[in-house]
Image: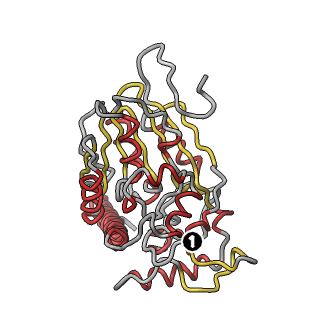
Amino acid sequence: MLIRIDEYVGKGYSRFCEYIFEVQAMTNQILDSVKSKYGAVAESSLSTENAGVKAVAEAFGYTPEELTSIPAEANMGLSCGNPTATAHIRPGEVVVDLGSGGGLDVFLASRMVGPEGRAIGIDMTPEMIERARANAKAGGYTNVEFYQSTIDQIPLPDASVDCVISNCVLNLAPDKPAVFREIARVLKPGGRVAVSDIALKHELPEAFANSIAAYVGCIGGAILIEDYRAGLLDAGLEHVEIVDSGADLNAYAKVENQAGCCSPKMDASNPFQVIEEPCCSPVPDESTSLHTELKALLSQYDINAAAASVKVYAIKPGAVGSKFCCAPTCCS
């Protein structure tokens, strides 16, 4: 049987195009779901004044003094770490926070860089940008800026940033290699990365990997720790270290009516058995079904066995003889 090469290639190209369209449609669905979810959080009344929100922030490394030093509305209980605590931010530096939300880490960084420095927040959700700018105005901050953009297209010049921080956001980016490349692009030579994120200890079950609910819940979009490391190295960064913080991801259950990254309420005597409605409710439209699906998935698996809150460090190659490093094992 003879097969014309142009006919075979044509069919293969058609199948390839269909695959590309499916991937793009999935990416758009993810971004729309993330925007919807975090837009709802931004329009909520969640703040440090809420005991559960404060408890989540403290569980992931913020001190009471840090939380009271910034606008209460900047904290909505969405953290999985405290990147400013380990970024070694210095006066006069330019720091950019990817996925800045209400401005929690931007405001903390602004105090560290001082009046001669700048703290910049990047977030794709209009409601979050509006909330962050309102917080900046209310707090009288003059050295902060907030830009609406996805983090795979950072609206900043090449080699313009001393330090990139982020807090539980890179796991939500569909195209992580693009994000890693953008981080390397905007960093100055010798610039550093200090990120708190969710990463995987092993591959997720297929049900998790294919779930929009798990993706928006900061689990499905997370990648393996070794892939995280490889991605940063491939982007041209070096001295990459990824450290499991040991934080309990079930801490998110302390927040009521939260629409962002969270896990269901747990029975204190059996932390892996779901017994109530998920903590992230109520949110209108598709969010309700997303939470129902996430609840069902999390009732079957131990989230702490599969995923971890990690501290990520990396350096952009700089001038010969430069020894500055922010990772735990390379500081002298």
Instruction: Answer above or below: position of 196 versus 299.
Output: above
For the residue carrying disc 1, how many other residues have a C-alpha within 10 Å: few (<14), some (14-19), or many (20+)?
many
**How far across and down, in percent of the image, does residue 124 sit?**
29, 59
For label 1, the residue is 254
Q: Please say whether residue 239 is visible from this viewpoint.
A: yes
Q: Is residue 122 above or below residue 56?
A: above
Identify the residue at the far right of this view: 269
Q: Give x and y (percent) for residue 274.
A: 64, 82
Residue placed at 40% from the left, 40% from the top? 164
The residue at the point 31 percent across, 49 percent down is: 121
Amino acid type for the residue under numbered disc 1: Lys
In this picture the colour scheme is: secondary structure
Image location of residue 76, percent across then percent down: 43, 64
Which quadrant: the C terminus? top right
Residue 235, x across and y down, in percent: 42, 38
Q: Nearer the viewer, residue 126 or 304?
A: 126
Residue 18 can be seen in this image: no
Quadrant where the N terminus is found in the figure: bottom left
Q: Compared with residue 191, is residue 23 higher up or lower down, i.e. above or below?
A: below
* Residue drawn at the location 52% of the way across and 47% of the way down: 228
Q: Nearer the viewer, residue 102 or 208?
A: 102
Which residue lies most toward the top here?
321
Does residue 57 appear left or right of residue 24 in this picture? right
Judge from the rendering whether residue 51 lies leftward or rightward of residue 127; answer left or right: right
